[in-house]
Image (spheres, rainbow, N blue to C red):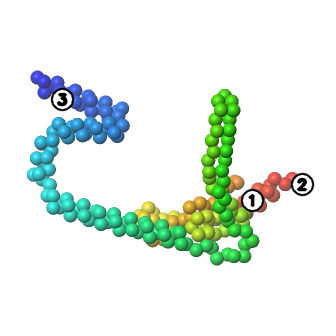
Amino acid sequence: MVASTAFPLALVALGVVFRYGTSLDLMVFGLFAFIGKQEVILDVVDRYIDFATVITSLKAGAALLAILCLLQVIRFFKGLSQSSSPDDSFPAKPMVFPCRTSHTRMFPTKRSFSYTYLLAGIPVGWKGSTGGMLSADVETKPATWYQELFSLKPLGAWFTVSGDDYFERGHLKEGLEGKLQKFLESEVSF
């Protein structure tokens, strides 16, 4: 009689955990279920799973993961050593400025804080990339996730400015400079 009432109660508990629980609740529930039926589960594992195959599979997976990590490290260093765009005729160059903002509030409670950040200064009209750090109006071809994952081609710059993201929607061939010029012309009234 006890077994007949315990099964529906276990299903109710499992349903409540699935409906209102988090992933941690499900892991704890699974851990207790494993501990309760440990002998049965270990008997099935011993009977149907060959440990030599499991170990060989784990070694192959670890080797593949090590190769993938090595590829990512190589790509990271290639991105850091990426040369700047060859256009040296532009009078200004992009720069990164270290900055700090501080704020103090006296009312309703006295509170102060400050934080540091980097300010990127990219001249309007400049196009290209500088050392894998900053880029502006650089055209990139979209790639699938697996092409990016297994590629040795460096990723884009850490901070990218695209003219398509500013002013009005759409793409202009002239980039951010063309959009700024168009915006300023629309603001001037004669």
Residue at (30, 38) in percent of width and height: 26
The crowd level at tag 3 (other Cα within 10 Å; few <14, some 14-19, many 20+) is few
Q: Quadrant of residue 130?
A: bottom right
Badge 2 element:
loop
Q: How many marks?
A: 3
Amino acid type, mark 2: Phe
Residue 128, picture quadrant = bottom right
Residue placed furthest toward the right: 190
Q: Is residue 67 above or below residue 120?
A: below
Quadrant that contains the N terminus? top left
Check residue 7 in the rendering and tell me which mark sits there, or answer none. 3
User: In the figure, residue 62 lies in which quadrant?
Assistant: bottom left
| Mark 3 and mark 2 residues within 8 Å of each other at the beta carbon | no
Between the residue at mark 1 and the residue at mark 2, the CA separation in whole angstroms equals 19 Å
Q: Earlier in the sequence, mark 1 or mark 2?
A: 1
Residue 102 location (% of width, % of height): 67, 44
Residue position for label 1: 180
The image position of residue 96, as x and y in percent, is 65, 61
Q: Determine whether, in the image, residue 125 is placed left or right of residue 150.
A: right
